[in-house]
Amino acid sequence: MNLIFIAPPAAGKGTYCTLLKEKYGFNHISAGDVLREQVSSGSEIGNIVKNIMAKGEMVNDDLMAKLIEIKLNSLDLNVPFMLDGYPRKINQVKDYERILKKLNLDVDKVLFINIDKETGLKRILGRVTCPKCNKGYNTLTGYMSPKVEGICDDCKIPLVKRTDDTKEAYEKRFDIYLNSTKEVLNYYKEKGKVIEIDGTKDPTTGFKELEILLGVK
Ligand SMILES: [Zn+2]
């Protein structure tokens, strides 16, 4: 099984990824990691990417497709995988489907974690972490709150704020994300492949829904 992940910032993607990985052994392919891996490998194509990024430019669709193809070819595709951060526009969808076809695969499902801007903002602004054990909490969402306000449940020490995001920065990131993925989402909606999860819920509750919708439980 293979999935494409579409999730605006603060939709809880990290939790879903971790659970899919831990419970079902999914490989997580992040477009950003694919770029970084190639750059640090020092491969020929990695050096091309490095030069483009050094100039502050974007990797074009052809090159991105090539990198995704290399990555997929390096994996055991009998293991389920999820792709995150790619494809982000219709041209990339076409590229990706061409790559999958060569591998005798097709996109199985597109996982869309739907969250409204306001809830996302609460998550971002409410994030606090324990400086000792790194456990994350949230003071604004109504779940993931520490038992005693401002104190780590385990270490009994004060929690610290984790985000540099301001309201404006978050809202801008959110809008850019939704605009850039809208076409991809609509394309797969028409094909009946989109699984929509209510991202305003606690991700562990949302994950139970996802398991049912994916038919893995
Ligand atoms: Zn702690």
Image (cartoon, grey):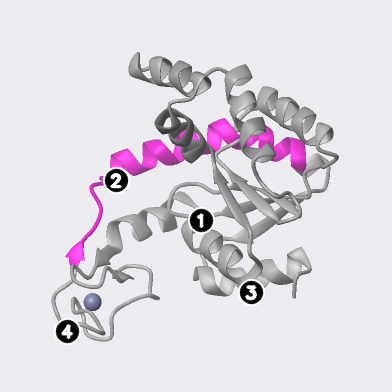
Say which residue appears at 25% left-offset and 84% top-offset.
154
Mark 2 against mark 1, which lies toward the viewer?
Answer: 1
Classify residue 92 by image quadrant: top right
Say if 70 sits above or below 171 in the image: above
Predominant SS along the magenta part: helix
Contact between marks 3 and 1 (CB within 8 A): the answer is no
Mark 3 or mark 2, which is nearer the start of the sequence? 2
Mark 4 or mark 1, which is nearer the start of the sequence? 1
Q: Quadrant of the N terminus?
A: bottom right
Mark 3 against mark 4, which lies toward the viewer?
Answer: 4
Mark 3 to mark 4: distance in Å?
A: 31 Å
As shown in the figure, which amino acid type bears the numbered disc 1?
Lys
Return the residue at label 4: 156
Say which residue appears at 58% left-offset and 55% top-offset.
113
Helix, strand or loop at label 1? It is: helix
Mark 1 to mark 4: distance in Å?
A: 28 Å
Helix, strand or loop at label 3? It is: helix
Helix, strand or loop at label 2? It is: helix
- Whole-percent x, y for residue 201 in the image: 52, 68
